Amino acid sequence: MRLRLPRITWHLGACVALLISLALHLAPQVRAQEAADVTFSPASGTAQVIAQGVAPLPEGNVVWRTVRSRAQPLANAPFEAQSLSFVLATNGPLLLTSQDGEQIHLGTNEAALTPAGTVQQRASLSDQEESFLSIELVPEDASPPANATVLQPGAPFAAPGGARDLDLLSDLLGSGESLTIPDSGGKNVILVTDGAATVGKPDGGSAVLLAGEAASFSGELLIAPAPSGGAAADRAGFVVAIIGPEIPPPALPSSGTQAPATPDAAATAETGSITISVYDCPSGMTTTTFNAAACALTEQDFDITISGSALSAPLTVGDAAADGATLVWSDLPLGEYVIAEAVLPLGYDDYGLAAASATGNSTLGYRVTLDAETTALTARIYNFTGE
């Protein structure tokens, strides 16, 4: 979903933002957790939930931390195991691709939740790196993320057990407006993204946070614009990451008979498959303005080559089996392969490929790997008309 906020402005400088742990506890945290229930909803007034999911939290003591990272262009962005985090596309579009091929396209000022341990590629959709923010919940002794800047972790607290409803709330308040974040039963964090905000207990002390500053809190939190006397006076844009109630485990259907045990496919597989879908993007769209949702499956002729040391000769479209709008090359020995679109649809002169752990470019092709962990690789090719 789309954030209702202007682009973040950093008043503290390019490298530092303050994460303040405020003493905003209206009641002991354990008692608050017991009071929470599955009917809880943080949204009210003009505030919107822009990302949400259900996920278990890390065990033991955890901290909220705000992280600034840079997403590399699609062809170079690595697949990495991610922390439990909300991802905010603050400066430009991002494409989040999981190892199983699931993709999430985030336009500027959109957000998504990533469960802990997800192997995910976070890629820029331009030919330049894009800065973005993530709000992470990690063990207190977690190592700093590689190639990223932690903008100061919060104070540790004991993570509640079970799978939790996690919400990212956003709002933009004007002069005279305020918002009360209800008691969710967990310890939450607010990040100011525009202007300045006064935050505190509804009946107690408060603190002023500038854009780029954050604070963790428990219980209710009252938020209002903090007068600054400047051009940005009396407005406050912010997001709030919220730990909600425990969600019951799913009630899966039962069966009177058990399915026969089967060998572990990852342990026994000696061959794999590559599945490819080809999309044509609208005329004028480039890697800079790429939007996967605007592209459609091609209806024109094209050809693809798949080459590798385990093959006696490159494979083409003629070697694939059609499965609806996709092509499947099966019974491939495990190993490395290079995928290239040798013939593009009429009117297109460039392409990109999205797949788990893919590296390369449209000139030399894209290198992928079939191994014991990834025996069935899914890829998408996007065609462009050029600049």
Image (tube, rainbow, N blue to C red):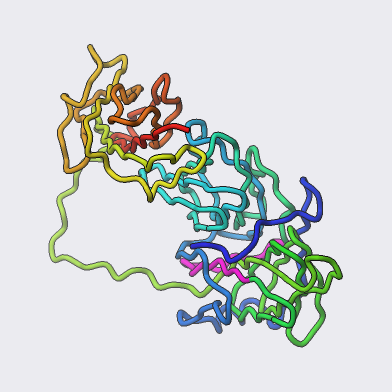
User: Measured along the vertical axis of the image, is residue 52 above or below residue 355?
Assistant: below
Residue 347 point in image, percent of width and height: 32, 31
Q: Quadrant of residue 206?
A: bottom right
* Residue positioned 22% across, 68% down in the render: 253
State the residue at coordinates (60%, 73%): 186
Q: Is residue 130 left or right of residue 27?
A: left
Residue 7, position in %: x, y?
A: 65, 56
Q: How many marks?
A: 0
217 above or below 104? below
Q: Residue at x 53, y 61 (%)?
A: 57
Say which of 310 and 171 sits in front. 171
Q: Residue furthest top?
A: 312
User: Which residues are the magenta region?
Assistant: 155-171
Asked whether 331 or 95 is in front, the reply is 95
Seen at 65% across and 76% down, the residue is 29
Judged from this view, the residue extending furthest toward the bottom is 203
From the top left corner, tell me how far across and down residue 89 is, in percent: 57, 52
**Residue 91 at x, y = what percent?**
62, 49
Specify whether residue 167 is painted magenta: yes
SS assignment for the magenta stretch, majority: strand
Outermost residue on the left side: it is: 257
